[in-house]
Image (cartoon, rainbow, N blue to C red):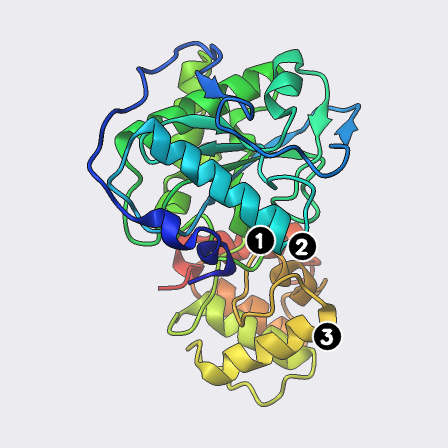
Amino acid sequence: MSRRGLLLGGLAVAAAATGVAGTSNAWGAEPDVIDCDAWGARPNSDVVPVWNQRPVKILVHHTATPNVTDLSRGAGERLARGIQNFHMDQRGWLDSGQHFTISRGGYVLEGRHRSLEVLRIGERQVEGAHCTGQNVVAVGIENEGTYTAADPPAVLWNRLRDLCAYICQQYGIDPTEIFGHRDFKDTACPGDVLYGRLPQLRTEVAGVLGQHVSRRIAAKESWPLLRVADRGPAVLAAQHLLREVGMTGVAADGTFDRRTADAVRRFQTVHRTEEVNGMIGGESWPLLVRPVRPGADGEAGRAVRALLASGAPARPAESLVGAEDWRRLLSAPTSLAG
């Protein structure tokens, strides 16, 4: 279980459902949100920073806690209190790290103090603590549960869509600017299943706002998450890139084995990434890739050719492959891990 999965401990005991949240809000209307006072939040330990700028994206997370069957409001409020206690007492933060939390029963709760107040104004941003590097430009939403292999409950999904639509409306955020935590960090969050449904979420949010987003644009190009047991061209490219930076003990065979994971951990340690976990995600990829010509000698050139050979969109041999090109090549369906 990830470190986020440790935050609630005994609060995840399931009980019978005693109620669920209300119906969907259309056209970007403000959804029902239980504010910090209403769920019994502790006072923040320091002044909550508020920036005089609008956020430009939304980050979706999951709590990596058990998928409980207690869908009551009380369960949602206990969740919020448990998260806040963990963040303040264990992490030493001034308050909950995320701006909003959605329970499995579909209750939307304010996370960090002032998040709802500032969102209603639509001009400024409460600084969060949900993703280093994104905390002053992105609204963070935690979704209760673990969505590695399970779908979120429909009521949670609907509230997530409603909340994202309201945030997009208030801040003028394009629905295509909804991301997962793993897009920026080496983490499985928000789980493979929920992450895989982000194109659907972008499309549905756009629909609520009366906009149209094509399937291609909604899918977006993203850094793939690579882990032990993954195979394929993206893994092979990563292994060549690791060898390029001196991890010569890695075999370039397209299988993400323990040796590859150990090399990734060494790389992460050297670069002081937030997580040293052997996974390659949205933080390690930008550090690994480098400008290179497709026909160049060396491991980086071999990485490009491995992706092109798999059917990724081709580039002229003399053109320079930069970070955005790498992401496009790696996000091609034939390049993804599997």
Q: Position of residue 64 (x, y in %)?
A: 41, 52
| Gap in angstroms between the C-alphas marked 2 and 3 | 20 Å
Question: Percent position (x, y) of residue 244?
Answer: 67, 78
User: Does residue 305 lie above or below 15 as drawn?
Assistant: below
Q: Which image quadrant: the N terminus?
A: bottom left
- Spatial CA span between label 1 and label 2: 6 Å
Residue at the location (44% across, 60% down)? 335
**Would residue 313 appear left or right of 132 to someone viewing this image?**
left
The residue located at (55%, 23%) in the rendering is 37
Q: Which residue is mark 1?
A: 327
Q: What crowding class fits label 3: few (fewer than 14 Cα within 10 Å), some (14-19), or many (20 or more)?
A: few
- What kind of residue is marked 1? Arg
Looking at the rendered image, the disc whose residue lies closer to the viewer, 2 or 3, is 3
Please state the horizontal and vertical placement of residue 82, each as a whole percent of the image: 48, 44
The quadrant in which residue 289 appears is bottom right
- Is residue 298 visible in the rendered image? The answer is no
Does label 1 or label 3 sit earlier along the sequence? 3
The quadrant the C terminus occupies is bottom left
Tell me, yes or no, whether the two marked residues, 1 and 3, touch with CB atoms within 8 Å.
no
Mark carried by residue 270: 3
In primary-sequence order, the first of circles 2 and 3 is 3
- Crowding at dot 2, Cα within 10 Å, few <14 / some 14-19 / many 20+, comes out as some
Residue visible at 64% across and 70% down? 295
SS of the residue under disc 1: helix
Residue marked by disc 2: 323
Splitting the image into 4 quarters, where does residue 288 fall? bottom right
Q: Are marks 1 and 2 in contact (CB under 8 Å)?
A: yes
Disc 3 element: helix
